[in-house]
Image: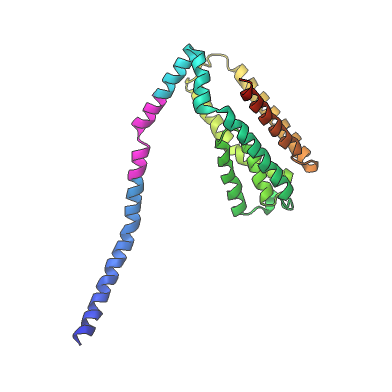
Amino acid sequence: MFRSAHSRFSVPRLRSASTAATAAAPSALVAALDSATASFLRPEDLVGWRQDLDARLARIQQHPEQGLGFIEEHVRQAGLVAIMLLVGASIMWLADRWGAQLRGVDDLGPAGALGIGAAQALALVPGISRSGVSISAGLFVGLDRASAARFSFLMATPVIAGAGLYELRKVVGGGTAVEGNVVPLVVGLLAAMLSGFAAIHFLLRYLRTNSLAVFVAYRVLLAALVIVSLLAR
């Protein structure tokens, strides 16, 4: 009797404690994420990083020879670029050979779109082309060549537009060296836009009837040129 009464009244208390803990878990998680974000993205750290970068660039302007060492050590290591050129060529060759190439952009599902978008992160590695790796990812998920290229360019549109608006805001706000006459700037923007549209139009027409072989060969030849230049030092 006492045992059953004990179990009768203790179980609800356990359940209420479990419910309270479950309800508190999201708040604790949010608080932990806020704390971690604040520790990694403190404004003073970003300001310090920007000041350090500005100081490095100022030294490079005064002593250009230091710029070569900085770029070689921190930005573009030629050996890594050569390897990644070959890796990118291999990825494009495999995608061109193994891709089903039976689907269009309208047939692409969320999982495939997410995979192509995630593949763009490989372009952070020097020597990997954003358009090349995203087109290859599109071929791997079954898109035909023209559709893969079209989707790759569509994905780049928000990034390019955002970067353009950011730079335009600096120009309008006087944060750049552009003063007075902005006609050359506008002409340059229009020329870049028209040439970009022409290049995309040509590439889409080319890929409707041709493979990626020419781009694979280009990457291999460029990698060989980089390797020869390294050995000749």
Question: In the rendered view, would you say 205 is above or below 188?
Answer: below
Give the side of residue 31 with respect to residue 170, left or right. Answer: left
The image shows residue 110 at horizontal and vertical percentages of 59, 53
Q: Quadrant of the C terminus?
A: top right
18 horizontally vs 173: left or right: left
- Residue 12 inside the magenta-drawn segment: no
- Seen at 62% across and 17% down, the residue is 184
Residue 32, horizontal then vertical, whole percent = 33, 49
- Left or right: residue 155 versus residue 75 is right
Question: Which image quarter holds the N terminus?
Answer: bottom left
Along the line of sight, which residue is nearer the eye, 168 or 102? 102
Instruction: Specify the farthest residue to the top.
Output: 62
The reply to whether residue 133 is visible in this rendering is yes
Q: What's the colour scheme?
A: rainbow
Q: Residue furthest right?
A: 209
Residue located at (30% from left, 67% from top) = 18
Q: Position of residue 133 (x, y in %)?
A: 63, 41
Vertical relation: 110 (above or below) 153:
below
Q: Position of residue 6 (x, y in %)?
A: 21, 80
Which segment is the magenta one? Answer: 35-51
Q: Which one is nearer the viewer's eye here, 31 or 138?
A: 138
Q: Which residue is located at x 68 percent, y 26 percent?
A: 225
Is residue 208 shown left or right of residue 127? Answer: right
Query: Magenta region, mostly helix, strand or loop?
Result: helix
Of residue 159 and residue 90, the one placed in the foreground of this image is 90
Return the residue found at the far left: 2
The answer to whether 53 is drawn above or below residue 16 in the figure is above
Tell me, yes or no, if residue 201 can be seen here: no
Q: Is residue 40 magenta?
A: yes
